[in-house]
Structure formats: structure tokens, C-alpha cells
Image (tube, rainbow, N blue to C red):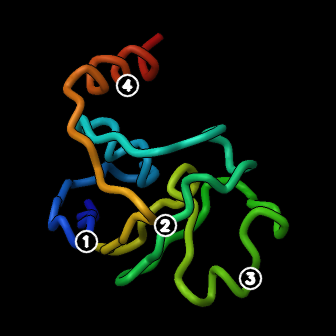
Amino acid sequence: MPKLTVAPQGISVDLREDETILEGLFRHGYAYRIGCRRGGCAICKVDLLEGTVAYNRPVAETVLSAEEQATGTCLTCRAVPETDITIALREENLRRVASLMALYAATRTG
């Protein structure tokens, strides 16, 4: 299972196989600014500082260009880590929200 670290806060969480960055953070009760959650709005872009990711569904070039991907930008709602990764959020920090864990569990089982 890959490990996700969020810099500079140093928060680390273990991700499940085939789990996106966003899903893993929400499952552990962390929140940050997101939009559509389907790869269409680009609000969840972060900087990939270390490691590699793959995309579980196609991402439009207009949302995330090949140049952005090559320089380490990724969409957390679609990016699935292939290795341990370190990311940096843009213009904000993670917030710990315990109720997100219950919300996430409900959406995964319902």
C-alpha cells in the first residue's frame, strides 16, 4: 500500500490499492478545497513532489495538460499513487474533520 505525505505539514496516511489521493485523505478525515470530484474542474490540483501516480480514468488535456503532468501537477480526485508520494497543496492546508470519515464510509457502502 502506498503512503501519502502532505508537505509541509508532514501529515502521512496509508492509501488502499487503487484509491485516489482525495479518497485516501477523506477516509482519514482530512479535507481541503475540492470541486466536481470527477476530473473536470481542476480545483483539486496539487504539486507532486515525490513519487508517481496513474489516472484511473482519462483526464482531459484542457483540465491537466501534458506539460503540467510532466512538471508534477496532478488531480487528486483521479490520481492513484503507484509509489509512496509526497504532495503539496496549493494556497491552503489540510483540515482535520472527523465527520468526513463517516460521510466517506456512507458514500462507499450506499
Regarding residue 33, the answer to whether it shows in the image is: yes
What kind of residue is marked 1?
Ala
Disc 2 to disc 4, how far (Cα)?
A: 21 Å
Q: Which of marks 3 and 1 is nearer the N terminus?
A: 1
What kind of residue is marked 3?
Ala
- Tag 1, which secondary structure? strand
Disc 2 to disc 3, how far (Cα)?
A: 15 Å
What kind of residue is marked 2?
Val
Identity of the residue drawn at 40% across and 64% down: 89
* Label 4 Cα neighbours within 10 Å, binned few <14 / some 14-19 / many ≥20: some
Reading the image, the residue beneath label 3 is 66
Identity of the residue drawn at 61% across and 55% down: 56
Reading the image, the residue beneath label 1 is 7
Drawn side of residue 60 relative to residue 107, left or right = right
Residue 69 circle label? none
Reading the image, the residue beneath label 4 is 104
Q: Residue extending furthest front? A: 91
* Label 2 Cα neighbours within 10 Å, binned few <14 / some 14-19 / many ≥20: some
Q: Position of residue 105 (x, y in %)?
A: 34, 21
Mark nearer the viewer, 4 or 1: 1
What kind of residue is marked 4?
Tyr
Identity of the residue drawn at 24% across and 66% down: 5
Disc 4 to disc 1, how far (Cα)?
A: 23 Å
- Tag 2, which secondary structure? strand
Q: Which of marks 1 and 2 is nearer the N terminus?
A: 1
Instruction: Tell me the quarter of the picture where residue 8 sits.
Output: bottom left
Residue 46 circle label? 2
